[in-house]
């Protein structure tokens, strides 16, 4: 079975890297639990323009270049791959991050996603077209909005738990807390 997976905060642990950068540069004490919204300005305490500036700055840092995998992701992907499943990765990262993203994914998941990483600039379905038309039967995602779009296309969705999505319980979508639960579910 083909499994589609979001990259940020599903495969690679983006939020701790952003927190580390922000704490160093702006004297904050942010932790993953503080990221209660995907609107980072709400977390940083600044407006949209300043948030974009800070994120542009983050994209040039070592923290961004060396984002670590989510706990259990490497082992979970290996177990699923060893059981005959294949993968594609999707991301709403901008194309200017392509090389760094591909290198980081390949470092931790060698050979698993090679040539199978889809990028877009803003809208989820543009980054992967229709996941079902690519043969994906399961989507692993942390954004409720994107998860609901896939569900509405008839794709089974596993919603990776995060502080930013805990206040929502979308119908027809299974919530998972970690990669062990993902492997058990699939």
Image (cartoon, rainbow, N blue to C red):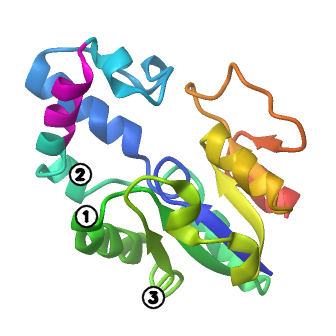
Q: Is residue 22 above or below residue 114?
A: above
Task: Read off the residue under disc 3.
Answer: 115
Mark 3 crowd level (few <14, some 14–19, many ≥20, 10 Å Cα)? few
Q: Quadrant of the C terminus?
A: bottom right
Disc sitting over residue 70 in the figure: none
The answer to whether the residue labelled 2 contacts the one labelled 3, judged by CB atoms less than 8 Å apart, is: no
Of 169 and 186, the residue lying toward us: 169
In three-dimensional space, the C-alpha distance between marks 2 and 3, rounded to whole angstroms, equals 21 Å
Q: Residue at x 59, y 76 (%)?
A: 88
SS at circle 2: helix
Q: Which quadrant of the view contains residue 177?
A: top right
Q: Main secondary structure of the magenta part?
A: helix
Mark 2 crowd level (few <14, some 14–19, many ≥20, 10 Å Cα)? some
Q: Quadrant of the N terminus?
A: bottom right
Q: Residue at x 13, y 15 (%)?
A: 27
Q: Is residue 145 above or below residue 87?
A: above
In percent of width and height, residue 76 lies at 66, 64
The answer to whether the residue labelled 2 contacts the one labelled 1, judged by CB atoms less than 8 Å apart, is: yes
Q: Residue at x 71, y 61 (%)?
A: 139
Task: Read off the residue under disc 1.
Answer: 97
Q: Is residue 110 above or below residue 55?
A: below
Q: Residue at x 47, y 76 (%)?
A: 117
Task: Read off the residue under disc 2.
Answer: 64
SS at circle 3: loop
């Amino acid at each position: 079975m083909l499994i589609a997976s979001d990259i940020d905060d599903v495969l690679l642990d983006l939020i701790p890297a952003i927190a580390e950068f922000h704490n160093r540069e702006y004297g904050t004490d942010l932790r993953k639990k503080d990221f209660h919204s995907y609107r980072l300005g709400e977390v940083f305490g600044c407006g949209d323009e300043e948030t974009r500036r800070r994120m542009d700055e983050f994209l040039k840092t070592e923290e961004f270049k060396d984002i670590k995998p989510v706990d259990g992701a490497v082992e979970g992907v290996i177990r699923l791959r060893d059981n005959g499943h294949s993968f594609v990765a999707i991301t709403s990262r901008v194309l200017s991050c392509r090389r760094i993203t591909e290198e980081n994914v390949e470092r931790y998941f060698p050979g698993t996603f090679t040539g199978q990483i889809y990028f877009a600039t803003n809208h989820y379905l543009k980054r992967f077209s229709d996941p079902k038309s690519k043969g994906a039967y399961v989507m692993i995602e942390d954004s409720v909005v994107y998860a609901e779009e896939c569900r509405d296309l008839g794709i089974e969705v596993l919603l990776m738990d995060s502080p930013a999505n805990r206040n929502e319980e979308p119908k027809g979508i299974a919530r998972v807390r970690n990669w062990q639960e993902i492997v058990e579910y699939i």
